[in-house]
Structure formats: C-alpha cells, structure tokens
Image (cartoon, coloured by chain):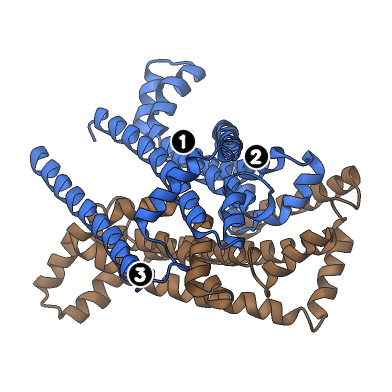
Amino acid sequence: MVSLRSWRDPLLVAISLVALWQVLHELAGDVAVTAPAPTLAHLWEMIGQARFLPHLRETGLAFLQALAIACGGGVLIGLVLGGHKLSGEVAEPILVGLYSIPKITLYPVILLLFGLGMPAKVAFGALHGIIPVVLFTMNAVRNVNRTYLRAGRAMRLTPLQTGWHILVPATLPEIFSGLRIGFSLTLLGTMLGELFASQRGLGFLLMTAIDLHDVKTILAIAVLISTFAIIANAALLAIDKRLHRGAAPEGAGKP
Amino acid sequence: MKVGKAKADNRATWIRVAVLASAVGALEIACRVGWVPATMVIAPSAMVKALIETLQSDDIGAHLQQTLSAVAIAMGLSIVGGFLIGFVLHWVPFLRRAFNPFLAAYYAIPHFAFYPLLIVIFGLGPAPLIVLATLFAMVAMIVATMAGLDRVPRVLLKTARMHRLSLLEEIWRIRLPAAAPHLLSGVKLAVAYSFIGVIAGEFILSTSGIGHEIAYAYDNFDNPRMYALILFVLAIVTCFNMAVYAYERRLARRRGA
C-alpha cells in the first residue's frame, strides 16, 4: 500500500503537467508549443533515425566522462580536505565562492584552454559537478564520530580495516548525497557546454532547432533530457534514502 | 575557547589570502614569461587594465544596466515567490508529496530549452530572460523554505501553544525566526541562481547584456575585453555573496551559535 501511495501523487503531477502542456498548446498554438502527442511521436521517430544516434552517443560519452571525473576527483579531494583540518578551512570558502559564480562566464576560457569539441564539454561538465561532491565529502569526513575511531583503535584495527569497517559506512550516506547533486549539475554543465559553440550532441541539435524555430524538435529533446534527469534522479534519491535510513540515528553522528 | 577559535579562523584566512595571491602571481609570471600563450589566458594585470578601459568606454553602461536590473527583478520575484510556494507546500502534505520528486530533479532539467517558448509568450526583450532566471532561482528558495519550516524545533511550537499564540503570531514570532538560517541560505542560492540564469540566458540566446558581450568578445577573439568582462561579473557576484555571508555570520553570532 505504501508504495502505491508514494507512486500515486507524482503520477498525478505528471498527468497534470501533460494536461498543462496541452492547455498551453491550445492557448499558444503550434507556433509556440506543439501538442504532447505529436511531440512524443516526433521524439520516437527521431530516436529511430540513424543520424540521431551519433549525437546521443556524443552527449552520453561527454556526460559519463565528466561524471567520472567529478565523482572520482571530488571524492578524492574531499577526503584530503576533510582529513586535514587546516587545508579544509582554507579551501571551503573558496569552494563555496566557486560554487555560486555563474560558471557559464568561464566557458570561453575553457574553450580556449581545451579547444572546441569533446574535452571542453567534459571539462565544463566536471567543473559543475565536482564542487558539491567535494563539499559533501569534506563534511562527511569531518562529521565522522570520534567515538567510532577510538573504538576502532581499542580493537586494534589496521588502517585498512579502519577505513573499510568505520570510515566507509560512516561517510557513505552523505557522500552519496553529494554524488546525487553532482550528477544533476554535471548533466546541466554538459548540456550548457553543448549549447554554446558545439558541432555535435543533443545540445547542438537543440541549438539548431532553436535557430530554425523547430518547436517540435525543441520540445522533443527537452522532454527526452528531462525524463532522463527525473528518472535517474528518482533512482538515486531512492538509494540515498535507503543509505540514510541504514545510517546512524539522527543526531548520533554529530559531535 | 572563543579566542582560540578566532585565532584559528584568522590563520586560515591568512593562508587563504596567500594561496589566492600566489595563484594570481603564478599566472601573471607564466603569462609574462610566455609559458601560457596570450591567445589562451592573458595576464591578470592585463585583465585589470582591460577592465578599467572597458568600464570607461561608454557603450558598456547600457548592457550593465540591463543585466543588473534583470538580475534584481528575478531575484526579488524568486525570493518572494519561492518563499510563498515553499510555505504552501509545507502546509499541504499532499501537494508536497506530489511535487517532491520534481523539485529534486528540477536542477537537472536544461531550462534553456524552453526559452523559445518563453519568447513567444512574453515577447522579445528582457521579460523572457527574467522569467527564465526566476524559474531557475525560485526552486532553490522553495526547497530552502520547506527545509527551514520542517526543522523548527517541537519545543518552540509547544511553547507557542502554552502561550496561546494565535496562528499568525506563532508563524511570525516562532516559525519564521526559527527557520531564518535556512531561509537565508535559500536567499543566497536564489541570488547566485538569478545571476547564473540571466547571464547564461544572455550568453546563449540574447543580443545584449553582459553575457552576450562576453560571448561576442569570444567570437571576435577579443581576449582582453572578454577577460575584463568575465572578471567584472565574477567580482560583482563574489561581492554580493560576501555581503550575504557577512550578514549570515552576524545573525549566527547573535543567536550565540
């Protein structure tokens, strides 16, 4: 019953969003908004076309590489900064500052550094995703309960055992929350990178469609990306909740 | 204890300044010596010089005014609207349960895809950009408002009942002050996202404003002007963030945290 309930409300919202879409179409006409059904049919047709797949692959590859860099690099940097107190204190305001600047202004710099094409997209996506991962990992490491570590020392655990049996379970839930946010931002960054000065990928298709005022294609791609984002995020959120439920009861992990 | 913490804070601040200064210095040297070609990055001193020249030329004022007023309007709308929507969602569990997955996935959706649609609805000019930035920034405020209202300690609400406060009084005197830190971090995000929304929109889809000027300078290989404008945007946003941060610190200190 519980699962039925948790599914029902989002489903209702999804249905009302589609209804709103239909109403917008009735109000604004085909020039601005195409109706849901033809748009989805168009999307289906596009996915079937051979010339669409290279673009999809390009975006997917760029996104996966950026995600790998953001997650791997972010966790690594976060572990170092969280483990060493002073460097963490030095770095945190810089990172928070970097997090809140409009990174799109830096895109030309990245284009100049990496050249046009895949590396620039990957770098831009990773730049978006890496900072929240670092911040969350850093906080996770800082908030590890000292009592656990003392208990580990009392039991004469080797450093490796300490890491595996204490640090990983204690920090995993929060790090995963960071990874979830990093995932969304990396996708946003990769897409933004493709919208500007790109020759391939979904972002490029979107830009071309905007220039041609091909509303059907614009909406089809927007729906494709949004659906992917929402489903991936819901899955990650479900894992996130599970991890947090398995973690220490509320307040116990805080010093 | 307090003095010791302040001292540690001070030390971290000094090291931070030293790290940043040496990074800028290293870039300056690398550019001057020629390790980094001027077609990639220009020296920081040259950026500042170009910035002063750009600000003195008279054509930049109109772009600046357009961008900043769009950001200001988007900021106001998203903070007020986000707070109200967050408040309503907090009080109506059904709506909240329904909207939660969408709020969580919201920032993964490429909003700029919907820009042509906004142009048709709101016409050309700054309006679609403002709407875009407002939509982008508002959700951060909604989420922060809900988080803040959720975390109002039970004890405070019981105290309010003991004093027989009316609903409005309870909201005004208990819930809002207790949620203030979260609301403030929502404001911080809304400020940052308003800037990101407007400038990114201008960058990709507009024909005027600072974002467009940066993209235009890039297209024309006008590196000094491009770096000058980038530096300018980053400086404005950083100043704004630091002001909010300072206010937040003051608020936290008054609460004795």
Left or right: residue B88 compared with residue A199: left
Do tags 3 and 1 sit on the same chain? no
**Image position of A59 with respect to A176: above or below:** below
Question: Of A194 and B215, which appears nearest the observer?
Answer: B215
Kindly identify which residue carries mark 2.
Answer: B130
Q: Which one is closest to the eye, mark 2 or mark 1?
A: 2
Inter-mark Cα distance, 2 to 3: 36 Å
**Tag 3 subunit:** A
Inter-mark Cα distance, 2 to 1: 28 Å
Q: Hey, which quadrant is residue B3 in on the image?
A: top left
Does label 2 or label 1 sit earlier along the sequence?
2
Do tags 2 and 3 sit on the same chain? no
Kindly identify the residue that appears in the image at 29 percent across and 35 percent down: B249
Kindly identify the residue that appears in the image at 31 percent across and 50 percent down: A93
Numbered marks: total? 3
Question: Can residue B237 be seen?
Answer: no
Residue A175 image position (x, y, % from top left): 38, 64
- Residue sitting at the far bottom: A50
**Picture disc at residue B149:** 1
Kindly identify the residue that appears in the image at 11 percent across and 38 percent down: B2
Q: Are discs 2 and 1 less than 8 Å apart at CB?
A: no
Chain A display color: brown
Residue B175 image position (x, y, % from top left): 43, 28
**Tag 1 subunit:** B
Chain B display color: blue
Kindly identify which residue carries mark 3.
Answer: A75
Amino acid found under the numbered disc labelled 2: Ile
Q: Secondary structure at mark 3?
A: helix
